[in-house]
Image (cartoon, grey):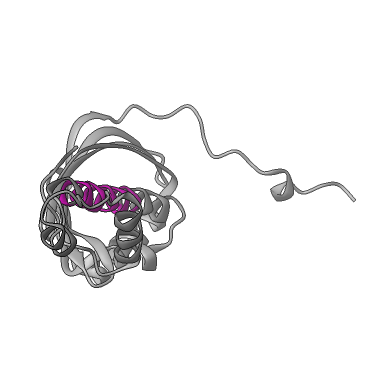
């Protein structure tokens, strides 16, 4: 994780930063030029404030990346699309997939749900860099597909991310899925039946 100085976020984090900054502010130095120290934050205080801003950005970006996988796993396609900027893109070059904008990204999720009998996605957050209102990062992925036609697909991959700060918080400007390992061996398992899905004799 690498952060450069970030601008304040226009969301829940703004109030939190202000409160935290007040809590961590050091006392003024009354021994020399008291008026100067009362009107200008000390270098130590500014450093603390920047650290708190970085921490708030990190928390928001972690939430964004986790929210993506949660929306995909829950087939919440509306929420999935809302995580992207209006011109945000989701691309999978190896599959010739490119969806731009929330509507196309929602439709992509709907298509995936329609052809997958079983789908699992796990994520492991990687490096993040933020500078001002933009950021970039990597997210390490594992996906398992069992398709309705009987074929299977397991991959390990990396999402190469670009982030954009908006009035609604951080959103994806782009996610590019780079597959590092692919296995199409038929899967031996399947979706288990829940107890309440089983017909009981009368």
Query: Which residue is rendered at x = 82% and y = 47% of the image?
Result: 200
Residue 120 horizontal/vertical position (percent): 41, 41
Task: Please count the marks in the image.
Answer: 0
Quarter of the N terminus within the rendering: top left
Q: Nearer the viewer, residue 196 or 140?
A: 140
Examine the structure image and report whether residue 160 is included in the region drawn in magenta.
no
Please determine whether, in this image, residue 8 is positioned above or below residue 154: below
Q: Nearer the viewer, residue 150 or 42?
A: 42
In the displayed orientation, state which residue is furthest to the front.
31
Q: Taken as a whole, is the magenta stretch helix, strand or loop?
A: helix
Residue 96 seen: no
Residue 127 seen: yes
Which residues lie in the magenta part?
46-64
Residue 147 horizontal/vertical position (percent): 39, 44
In the displayed orientation, state which residue is furthest to the right.
202
Query: Which residue is rendered at x = 47% and y = 27% of the image?
Result: 188
Residue 84 horizontal/vertical position (percent): 24, 64
Q: Nearer the viewer, residue 38 or 64?
A: 38
Residue 66 horizontal/vertical position (percent): 36, 48
Q: Is residue 57 left or right of residue 162?
A: right
Q: Nearer the viewer, residue 51 or 194?
A: 51
Examine the structure image and report whether residue 59 is included in the region drawn in magenta.
yes
């Amino acid at each position: 994780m690498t952060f450069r100085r970030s601008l304040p976020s226009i969301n829940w984090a703004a109030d939190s930063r202000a409160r935290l900054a007040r809590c961590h502010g050091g006392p003024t130095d009354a021994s020399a030029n008291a008026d100067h120290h009362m009107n200008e934050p000390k270098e130590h205080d500014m450093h603390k404030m920047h650290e708190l801003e970085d921490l708030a950005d990190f928390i928001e970006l972690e939430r964004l990346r986790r929210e993506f996988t949660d929306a995909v796993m829950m087939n919440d396609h509306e929420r999935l699309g809302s995580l992207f900027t209006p011109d945000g893109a989701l691309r999978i070059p190896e599959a010739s997939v490119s969806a731009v904008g929330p509507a196309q990204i929602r439709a992509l999720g709907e298509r995936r749900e329609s052809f997958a009998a079983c789908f699992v996605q796990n994520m492991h957050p990687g490096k993040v860099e933020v500078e001002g209102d933009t950021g970039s990062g990597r997210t390490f992925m594992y996906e398992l597909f069992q398709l309705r036609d009987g074929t299977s697909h397991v991959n390990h991959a990396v999402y190469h991310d670009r982030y954009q700060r908006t009035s609604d918080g951080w959103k994806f400007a782009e996610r590019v899925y780079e597959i590092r390992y692919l296995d199409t061996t038929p899967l031996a398992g399947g979706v288990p039946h829940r107890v309440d899905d089983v017909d009981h004799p009368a």
